[in-house]
Amino acid sequence: MIDAQPAEADDTVAEPQQGVGPLLPGAQREARPLRQQILEHVRAHGRTARADISRALGVSAGSVTTLTSELIGLGLLREVESAGAAPTTRGRPPVALELVSEGRLVIGIKISDERNTAVLVDFSGAILADAARPVPPTRRTLDQTCHEIDALIEAVLAQAGRPRDELLAVGVGLSGMVDHESGTVLWSPHLGPDMPLGPEASRRFGLPVLIDNDANMLTLAELWFGVGRQRSDFAVVTIEHGVGMGLVIDNRLYRGERGMGLEMGHTKVQLDGALCRCGKRGCLEAYIADYALAREAATALGRSPQSPQVMLDALYAEAKSGNRAARSIFNRAGRYLALGLSNVIQLFDPELVILSGERMRYDYLYADEVLSEMRELTLVEGRVPARIEIHAWGDLVWARGASALALADVTGTVLAEARSA
């Protein structure tokens, strides 16, 4: 089943009062303290009654009452009037619980090759401010990257008028191979190799700075704010400056044994094929990423190379006007994308595959012919084929996914510090 129309999703989808975060529990729930599960459940639903918490978590009503009272006393939850519910038998207004979000902030940042973006969010996941800064189109050093992160931190805090001491953590997403556990960027088209960005930024700023691959950040955005909130297993394929993939299994982001799996853009689709920016040949990215299409556009249109965005917009306009060379470039990219998607479906058998990223504006990449060829390349006999959805998110969604990384990391810490205090 295919939804071949791009879903215009702005960055305010799933407003905070409606909750943010996964709505399905997942098997890993049991590994977290019950108090933390309650906090995360309330955040995911925005506002919820104690009875709903008891049913959802499979915990007795008495235990929920005791633990939520403790969390209220710690200043992490508060009671609010439950709108739309009938009064109790004693005439009291029905009561719900919501997170106390004030005074606890995190920032999500996307490092890119043209401009960096950031969002400031409170403990409930509500966006308070956002910022974007242009960057030089060159590889940056560790010191330069830390300066860029610091500038974005200052920008969003100043915009919201919030002090720096309310900031608990920063999440950062970027293209390339990232060891999430150590915070080391092993390879990136934007930064130098083997860069200990997480440890160095944490040392400079005096707070946790969590680093991950940007495709994982977009996948977290779907899991926390998008259609993934209602699904326990799905895949996200991103087409931007590169080609990335994120995978959620049992409501949890899958990274692989060493945290560097799912590099879909660097799977090989052609022996001795086109040169990829990673230095190897035949990568899928070398055929469908924006720099690859821009490279071919310069030849097809007889123009001097310009920024990928300018070249792609020109190529797309020519294709729409009937230029056969321009159309052939998109058509070939679509066939390679069909090949890549069929491999994803064959390997992981997800219920849903989300195609996301700015390049989803170019409908040649999800034309009926592309999706039809994907199905022909995939063994689906006797089964319902994976659903394909197109999500044309705004630019800030990457940074918002990075803020979810930071929120997930600090929730347990906030709880532990509140109890110890």
Image (tube, rainbow, N blue to C red):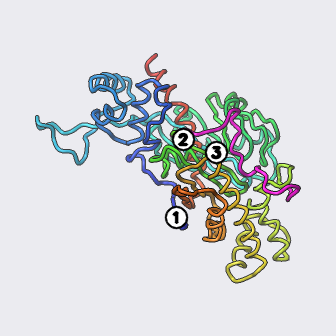
Sort mark 2 into few (<14), some (14-19) or many (20+) by Cα contacts within 10 Å: many
Q: Which residue is mark 1?
A: 3
Residue projecting furthest to the bottom? 322
Disc 1 marks a residue whose amino acid type is Asp
Cα distance in 3D space between marks 2 and 1: 26 Å
The magenta region covers 251-275
In this picture, residue 291 sits left or right of residue 5: right
Tell me the crowding category of disc 1: few under 14, some 14 to 19, or many 20 or more residues within 10 angstroms, Cα based: few
Secondary structure state at the residue bearing disc 3: helix
The residue mark sitting in front, 2 or 1, is 1
Question: Which of the 4 image quadrants contains residue 255?
Answer: top right
Q: Residue at x 62, y 56 (%)?
A: 379
- Please say if the residues under marks 2 and 1 sit with CB atoms less than 8 Å apart: no
**Residue at far right of view:** 272
**Residue 111 belongs to the span the image colors magenta:** no
For discs 2 and 3, the disc positioned in front in the rendered view? 2
Which residue does the numbered mark 3 point to in the structure image? 152
